[in-house]
Image (tube, rainbow, N blue to C red):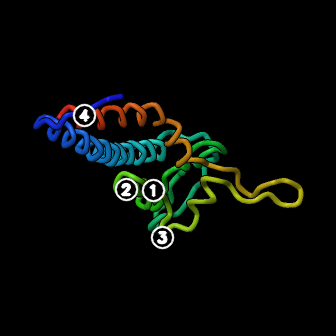
Amino acid sequence: MIDIISNKNNDKIFKHLSALDQHYRSGIHQAYIVIGKYLERTNRDDFRAKKNGLLYRIRINGRIINHRASAPGEPPARLTGNLEKTIKTKTSGFTQMEYSAGGGRVNYARYLEEGTKKNNEGKRKMEPRPFMSKAIRDNEGKSVITFYRQIGRRLRCE
């Protein structure tokens, strides 16, 4: 059996223990913010990276330009930048982080990420050009380290 004897130091210990919960929450929230920036940066870099798809001649603002599309499996090629502008990360305290694209302004984000549905013959009009799932995979290791660092920083501040 353990006897706890009232002592003025007990209050300090209980106060410290209750503060730990807030430090963890704060660290998780900050980690979400940092990870969101990683994801957005990865998408920006992937959209601008060299592509291996078909070469098109397209008229934009009265000018004809050559545009190299992405091949199936590559992140989409940047043409107007509209998709990139819709990529957002949003945190809800320490409990949730949302990573989204499209946001009602771009109606093709899902088709690029997942491809179009297969028809009766099992063919698609367009194969997937994953950009969100690729960014998540590319940043998986960094994300784990970010959680450790952000939580650790707050625990050391006490």
Q: CA distance from mark 2 to mark 4?
A: 41 Å
**Disc 1 vs disc 3: Cβ atoms closer than 8 Å?**
no
Is 64 placed above or below 11 here? below
Amino acid type indicated by mark 1? Glu
| Residue identifier under label 1 | 98
Left/right of residue 21 with respect to residue 126 in the rendered view: left
Q: Tell me if mark 2 has few (under 14), some (14-19) or many (20+) residues whose alpha carbon lies within 10 angstroms of its own.
A: some
Image location (x, y in percent) of residue 76:
55, 49
Question: Distance between the Cα atoms at labels 1 and 3?
Answer: 17 Å
> Which one is nearer the viewer's eye here, 73 or 38?
38
Asked if one can make out residue 158 in the rendered structure from this viewpoint, the answer is no
Quadrant location of residue 9?
A: top left
Instruction: Determine the secondary structure under disc 1.
Output: strand
Q: Is residue 51 left or right of residue 142?
A: right
Name the spot of residue 158 as percent of width and height, x first. Answer: 16, 36
Please give the residue where the numbered disc 2 appears in the rendered image: 91
Q: Indicate the secondary structure of the residue bearing disc 2.
A: strand
Residue topped by disc 4: 4
Neighbour class for label 1 at 10 Å: few (<14), some, many (≥20)? few
Q: Earlier in the sequence, mark 3 or mark 2?
A: 2
Residue sitting at x 26%, y 47%: 22
Q: Nearer the viewer, mark 3 or mark 2?
A: 2
Determine the CA span between mark 1 and mark 2: 6 Å
Q: Between disc 2 and disc 4, whose residue precedes?
A: 4
Residue at 50 percent across and 63 percent down: it is 102
Kindly identify the residue that appears in the image at 37 percent across and 58 percent down.
92
- Quick check: 142 above or below 113? above
Label whose residue precedes the other's in the sequence (4 or 3): 4
Q: Residues within 10 Å of mark 4 (few under 14, many from 20)?
A: few
